[in-house]
Amino acid sequence: MTINHLDRRTVLRGAAIVAAGAGLAACGDDAASPAATSSAAPTTTATAIGSFSEAPAAPVESSDATDAGSAENALGQAADVPVGSGVIFEDAKVVVTQPTAGSFKAFSAVCTHQGCLVSKIETDKILCNCHGSSFSITDGSVLGGPAPTPLPAQDISVDAGNIRLGSS
């Protein structure tokens, strides 16, 4: 019986090649094209935050959807935002809440911890499932988790039952 012995360098070289190949394959999967990362219809999740607020330093208005005109700035219907809760508009990266009847607020849906989109709203909290941060539906302040700062406020307007990004 013949036993082939491999020297340490050959084994390490082979392991490095396998690891590099796996890393490249993973990068290829994560580096999806913009077309692959956008969805045709906005996804919403119930959430709530009250009253109009100023836009943050890095406003969502930089997206193509908000530059196109007032029809493109439409997020949804005010009637779809539950009182004491809210809705996450993932495509626009905005959370709109209604802490009290008729009082709407909007915040960036991008968590201030590591940039994940917030995922849901439970009771009076906006939650980010990536690392457990939670934010107030009334002012976007940090309620818990590793997030260092509040969710930035966004300008919205409510006109004829329609919620739009930006002021009217």
Image: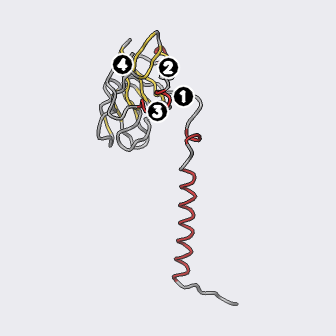
Report whether 33 appears left or right of 92: right
Could you tell me which quadrant the C terminus lies in? top left
Residue 20 % position (x, y): 53, 66
Q: CB atoms at circles 4 and 2 under 8 Å apart?
A: no
Label 1 sits on residue: 42
Question: Is disc 2 in contact with disc 1, using a CB cutoff of under 8 Å?
Answer: yes
Residue 111 at x, y = what percent?
38, 38
What is the CA distance from the residue labelled 1 to the residue labelled 4?
Answer: 22 Å
Nearer-N-terminus badge (1/3): 1
Q: What's the amino acid at mark 1?
A: Pro
Nearest to N terminus: mark 4 or mark 3 = 3
Q: Position of residue 61 (x, y in %)?
A: 42, 29
At 32% from the left and 43% from the top, the residue drawn is 146
Contact flag, marks 4 and 3 (Cβ < 8 Å) = no
> The residue tagged with tag 1: helix, strand or loop?
loop
Residue 30 — which label? Answer: none
